[in-house]
Amino acid sequence: MLAHDGVRFRVWAPAAARVEVELEHGRVALERAEDGTWHGRVPDIAAGTRYRYRLNGDAAFPDPYSRSQPEGPHGPSEVVDPTAFEWHDAAWQRPRIEGQAIYQVQIGTFTPEGTFEGVIGQLPRLKQLGVTAIEPLPVAEFPGERNWGYDGVDLFAPSHVYGGPDGLKRLVDAAHQHGLGVILDVVYNHLGPDGNYLRAYSNDYFTERYHTPWGDAINYDGPNSQWVRKLVVDNARFWFDEYHVDGLRLDATHAIYDSSATHILAALSKAVDGVLIAETHENDVRYLRSRSDGGFGIDAVWADDFHHTLRRYLVGDREGYYADYVGTLDEVAQCINQGWLYEGQPSPRSGTPRGTVARNQPAQQFVYVIQNHDQVGNRPFGERLNHQVDVERYTAASMLLLFLPYTPMLFMGQEFAASAPFQYFTDHNLELGRLVTEGRRKEFAAFSAFAEPELRARIPDPQDLATFQRSKLDLTEADREPGRRVQGVYAQMLRLRREDPVLALQDRQCMEARALTATVLQVRRWRDSQERLLVANFGDDAWPLDGPGAELVLTSGAAAGVSGVPPRTAVILRRG
């Protein structure tokens, strides 16, 4: 950290016999403390100085707490003055989860620039659209020039590819000036393999007691785990304190293993003052309960059952996790009424129970989507929902998402039915890249469409630059048909969520969903004597309405009266 008399360094390296700060002009030895940390002061250096820690006189490595890696994860760390940036958001009030409509972005593909600065240019459009917060995919330093962000290795260092520390601060500051919150995606279940030097400092950062699909599990409950827990808690606080973010989305929390008395998720919710959202398929109400009630105190969780039931119905997907769903509107309605579908009943795929009952939890604690980076990007060719259904059914599904009282999240480009896919892309070294390409294609070997090797070879190579380039949005589509019309429906729905006295109330106890037919879904919401009715007709025949005294508020497609709903159209009616 910077001090008036130079820079003070401190690093945990309990097994090292000697630790030195390596600078351009030489090395400075650090002193060992009893707790296994090494510390010391280097005079006459300032922000911008690049350094490494040299261990035992051998190899030198980046700082585990590095705030900046201007040459990437393999290069030196850079001293950053955390007080140098001039913020303009003193009047900003950090929002809670209530009332949020989240917009998920991948920095590299959201704009032509692929930078934090590029996102700033889109903030006026997003504000006009009506979302309340942006959620960037992970921005921690990663190897190469392109990555989803889940291979990050320097938790405290915003990627130099996107614009580094100052770039992210400018983005957060600009978002707040536009009245938009920032919820940052972070990864605490694993770290990427390329550029990950934590083992050089201590083997206790990781554990072999547990395993994740992406690499070694992080040690939250074994020997020396207090230092590992400190790293993660410090990192969470860091984003709130130094970068003014409003919340964190915690990646794949089902792969965070911790048997200690205080689970690391509960420790995180206690340590930070801001929104925490967990990505998990567990349907576990423990996440949402307060710490005093034995829970983790998390503000919201991803509720993927809604996406899975609706996509199974609309598109017919039935392999992989879609095998757990039957694909009817009755099932979609059941999921909506319960919050999620699985409440402890056995999964057909595994035969084991999944989920808990959470019907009394507030609506805002359930994050609902019709697409996100995973549900698009983890498909073989990165197809969006609007690539698989016609624009009428897609717009009707969009109105359904935004009519519900749950917290909606949009994936970038969703609001104008983007033509670009979102494919899985990386930029690893040649050997690791080869393994990633092979592994990506093996993932789909069990799917009937890719049973043969020559069919799997058609799956885009994550390492190919063209895979990344195909995934970039064409933002001009928002101003052309059908994008302009679809975006108009999104904007009107988001306005209704803010301004309509019934829809602005996130009260799931005043909501009921039911399938009227195999192709028509009705959702009713009410407040006192006022009622709002959404009828989504996903079929090819008109659906009659008995709407005495009803007023048409909005339709997803062609003009409709209260006497009927045209095919592949959703309408909202007002009564009272």
Image (cartoon, rainbow, N blue to C red):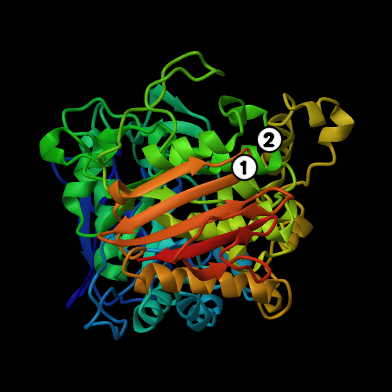
Residue picked out by circle 1: 311
Q: Nearer the viewer, residue 233 or 68?
A: 233
Q: Secondary structure at mark 2?
A: loop
The answer to whether residue 217 is left or right of residue 195 is left
Picture quadrant of residue 525: bottom left
Amino acid carrying mark 2 in the image: Asp
Q: Nearer the viewer, residue 537 or 485?
A: 537
Find residue 317 and name its label.
2
Q: Residue furthest right?
A: 454
Q: Are marks 2 and 1 in contact (CB under 8 Å)?
A: yes
Residue 274: percent from the left, percent from the top? 24, 60
Residue 41: percent from the left, percent from the top? 21, 64
Q: Counting residues from the N terminus, which is met first, the one under dot 2 or under dot 1? A: 1
Residue 523: percent from the left, percent from the top? 46, 50
Q: Residue at x 37, y 37 (%)?
A: 338
Q: Secondary structure at mark 1?
A: helix
Amino acid carrying mark 1 in the image: Arg
